Image: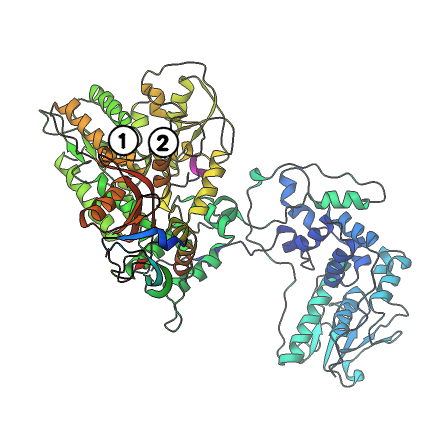
Amino acid sequence: MYNLDTSKCIQTEPAFCKAVCPFGLDVPDFIKKLQRGQFNSAYQVYADTVGFPEIIARLCPALCHDACIRVKVDASIDLHLLEQACVRYADRREPPAYNLPARGKRIAVIGAGLCGLSCALRLVRKGYTVDVYERKAYIGGQLWDLLPPEAFLPDIERQLANTCYELHLNYEIKSLSVLGSYDAIFISTDPNGQFSGKYQQEQGVFFKNLSVGLGPVVAAAHGFSIALEIEAYLKTGIMFSYENRTCKTRLCMNEREIKSQPKVQAGEDGFTSEQAQKEALRCMACSCNACKHHCDLMAYYQKYPSRIKDEVTGTIYPSADFIHRYATRLIASCMQCGLCKEICPADIDVGGYLNEALAELHRQKALPPVFHEFFLRDMIHANSEESMLCKMPDGVEHCQYLYFPGCQLGASLPAYVTDSYEELRELYPDTALLLRCCGIPAKWAGDYSLYRNMLVQIENSWEKFGRPSVIFGCPNCQNVLLQEFPEMSGQSLYSILADMEIRKSQRGVAAVYDPCAARYDVQTQNDVRQLALRAGYILQPLSHQGTMAQCCSWGGQTAIANPSMVKLVKKRRAGEIEAPYIAYCANCRDVLASTGKACVHILDLLFDLGNAQRNPPNATERRQNRVTLKHTLIQRFWNETSDCACSSAEMLEIPAALRQTLSDRYLLEEDIWAVIQCGEREGIFIEEAVSGARITHKEIGSITCWARYIPLEKGFQLLDGYSHRMQIVEDRHA
Amino acid sequence: MHEEENLICMPCGVPLQRLPVQFSYLGHTFDAEAPRCPQCGQVYLSYKLVSERIAEAETELEDK
């Protein structure tokens, strides 16, 4: 199966500031506490990381300043002043009263500068016994050249207050042999000094491995690293080398998505506590969350690609002892819009992976059939004798063009297809017509065998017409067929009609809603905008458009697998701006209009058809529209007559509100009619003694449909229709 | 009056009774009580039952 390479994912990469900090301070955690005004908690994080917080807060070289992504937008977060504010406003600054129990290991540190003291501090807190040797009469080393003693001696005293270590001043070590027995020794004096080149191969002897002149803060951080090396050595007997704590980060963020927020101006004494909190709030705690930010599925599940991969793997290859396919719904919830790959800096294609996973679940027969059955039946209907049409204009043997409107354009409004085909026939009289589904519902259902079957049928028709250039009315069909048949040429209907005359009027502000399937079809995106402008609209951009287009919720046909997510997505899309939308995908148009959002299809403008408020047809009406469309086309363009199949409409009365309810429950009126017919024919139903209403049920595919109805003089009136997925075992109706 | 007494099985012509009904879904089977004809076994599931308890159980099994 397709593998998702999540090793490329940069979600766990350190923030830019953390990566350059000599101590590797967890800046996002530190800042989060400052944002809440929790100076004591922030101080704990800071002190635990840097050892001597008051000294480091003064001398910090603020390498993070240039690393902060805000420097490209407004101004870096002033972390240096925030460190100082943290130290100033924390009122609980005492070090831990208890350290770990003594471990019975002795370490000698030679040199009581900030590097040696930092190493000693970390080791004594971990329970090691430390002796510090200093040739001078005082501790602090180069700090004396940088700060007044009252600025650093109290901090050193405070941090080492509750620890057991011995300080030997005026004690120059010329040879390690004078030290006696230690489990490890750290020579924290100048690397070019008296120990240069000596004891290099000695087990348990560690050196300050720094270029001179990097400053006391880098030296202190180095001391901490040496403490880690010593601890590892004492536990394993191996001398590991911890590199400088600063590390590289692969993190990248799009600064164009960052909102500018001016830097908080500090007074002469630095930030007040309020100013510090405000400045901290400018920090975005940088981490890559592009997928969770843009992808509806990852936002809904609050999961990143690596977690998704783990869960999907466990679902597809469950343990033989404990089969728990817990990510099935997640797998079936992907809208297959391709945005995740587009926005991921590491090109991680979660959508492609989930479609492969879906196919695997389908192959294993582990996917609840009901998730896609309704949509697959719709596809079969679109490709049935009732709805499908595959015809060349009369008298034509080879066609230059083939119009492929897709199955949903005419289902939404038959005139979208009839009027556009009429226009095409005027432009190119030899344009053939192939009215059917492209097969994408089968791909979205993970049924690749069915999908390939659909493609073969389309290819045969295309070959029969003489391999014409294809004009697509549906961006999904265009996407699928041009991808699957590289030798096929084609373009969208909306580009072909880009120069058509359009009635201009004062239409106000609107936004073009790019369908996800047209993400890379820049030509059509521009042509539709030009048409909208010529129609008299003032265009407003959407947050996600062009290559960033988000799915309207139709993609992947996930509405039955995950109705709550789809509901959220629809609401989010429709609510982004107040202005109406202009769509050029019939699915987008109808999905958005179903929420009450004003939305026109670009063909509404070109041919003066529907309006932005037109209610989208329900599931049954969509089928009826397809059937009607086929008959209209045959009559208008081929001058042939045909009989429209009789539907249940004459025999079954359904109140308008119930019609919508049935559609919302993914129930077709013809199925409900079949249930009633079956019950009545066999005389098997339940009668409510009080109301006289009858109730009967029947399995249709993988669901059981129920109808509650009353008999009329002629026919029936439906009172309710519903379904469930569970099967009733030993049912009389089975 | 119990719900079942208002429900008459056709063609048996007798009121339904609360009786065990076996359900199966995605390879799992389990029993529950529901109105059922004591003679022919015809079952009645109300919209309320279907949209609440049954839908909940279906979701649980799909996520298992």
Magenta span covers which residues? A546-552
Residue A140 at least partly seen: no
Residue identified by numbered label 2: A616
Q: Is A348 positioned to the left or the right of B28 in the image?
A: right
Name the one closer to the observer, B42 or A16.
B42
Q: Based on the picture, tell me whether residue A548 belongs to the magenta stretch.
A: yes
* Front one among A81 and A626: A626
Q: Specify the subunit that label 1 lies on.
A: A
Q: How is the image coloured?
A: rainbow
**Of A30 and A25, the residue lying toward us:** A30
Residue A193: x, y in percent? 77, 69
Amino acid tagged 2: Pro
The residue sitting at 33% across, 15% down in the picture is A501
Residue at image mark 1: A410
Is A663 placed left or right of A52 in the picture?
Answer: left
Q: Position of residue A257 (x, y in %)?
A: 56, 39
| Residue A641 covered by magenta stretch | no
Where residue A260 appears, as percent x and y from the top left, is 64, 36
**Disc 1 secondary structure class:** helix
The answer to which image quadrant residue A731 occupies is bottom left
| Mark 2, secondary structure of its residue | loop
- Residue A28 in sight here: yes
Looking at the image, is A212 positioned above or below residue A721? Answer: below
* Residue that appears at 38% across and 32% down: A589
> Which quarter of the rendering shows the N terminus of chain A?
bottom left
* Residue neighbourhood size for the residue with mark 2, other residues' Cα within 10 Å, grouped as few (<14), some (14–19), many (≥20): many
Labels 2 and 1 share a subunit: yes
Q: Is residue A299 left or right of residue A693?
A: right
